[in-house]
Image (cartoon, helix red, strand yellow):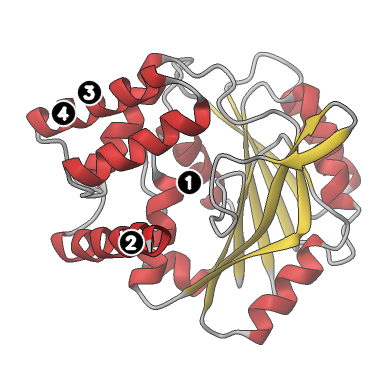
Amino acid sequence: MRISIIIPAHNEAVFLKECLDSFVGQSYLPNELIVVDDNSSDDTFAIAQGYAQKHLWIKAVQRKSTDEHIPGKKVVDTFNFGLEHASEHDLLGKFDADIVLPQDYFENMVNQFQANWKLGMCSGLLFVQNGDEWVYEDIANKNHIRGPIKLYHNACFHKIGGLRSGVGWDTVDILLAQYHGFDTLTLPELKVKHLRPTGHGYSSRNYQSKGVAMYKMRYGLVLTKIAALKMAWQAKSPGLYIQAIWGFLKALLQRQAKYVSKKEGKFIRTYRWKGIWSKIQ
């Protein structure tokens, strides 16, 4: 199976070498790895160029964009820029520049996709350093495929219409994959090191955008309150709940465009409620 990987990178010089070393050391090498430097002011592009000169299957390209931090949209737009440079592939990956893969990562991925023709997305799990140990980054269920390690079957990627440009893109893609009849799978034995914990540098605007994403996924207010409460509890931040609800209400008042159709939204709400009731019973 041909694998194309795209890594959006902005000022990732601290982590990029260790990340790329883990790709170069794979037992099953990707056919193509595209590092997209998004307006970096550090050595990100120079590092990527160095690897591209040593390995013909690695490319380094540059994208010029605004310096403004736009959660979700900036990374998806950078990914899409890289996708324009991609060759034909069976599997398409969106990976972050601050992760380190186990050596047999893609070997296991290919085995899973070849064994199940309905598999649309697959990943390992993210772990963060806690002292001398690496522990599971407990901000999502272990069956959730996290944004930094997305790997799609090409058929699934096209069926869901690519990635939504905004916060929540890495949740709505899973829900749409399931809506279209694809399986999604995480492999707990594949422990991926996340060198920079999620939420680093988050602001109140970031938290509001989570509420906006729930509005765009057609959660409805009740589901949004439940999801925001869960996030606030996990983050130990009551303010997150308030900001998320405020973001939802602002998007509602502004009648912002949705990520999904009414039919897809109904499926998403039903799916979410089933998950909630299964945990209560």
Gap between marks 1 and 4 measured at Cα: 29 Å
Disc 3 designates what residue?
A: 246
In this view, the residue in front, 109 or 128, is 128
Q: Position of residue 268 (x, y in %)?
A: 28, 60
Residue, x 19% and y 63% (percent of image)?
266
Between marks 2 and 1 in the image, the one whose residue lies nearer the viewer: 2
Pinpoint residue 187: horizontal percent, then vertical percent.
69, 64
Image marks 2 and 4: residues in contact by CB distance under 8 Å? no
* Distance (Cα) linking label 1 and label 3: 30 Å
Q: Is residue 211 left or right of residue 38?
A: left
Q: Earlier in the sequence, mark 2 or mark 4?
A: 4
Badge 4 is on which residue?
A: 249
Kind of residue sitting beneath label 2: Trp
Tell me whether the residue at label 1 lies in contact with that at label 3, contact meaning CB atoms closer than 8 angstroms.
no
Ranked by sequence position, the earlier of labels 2 and 1 is 1
Residue identified by numbered label 1: 80
The residue at which mark 2 appears reads as 277
Quadrant position of the C terminus in the picture: bottom left
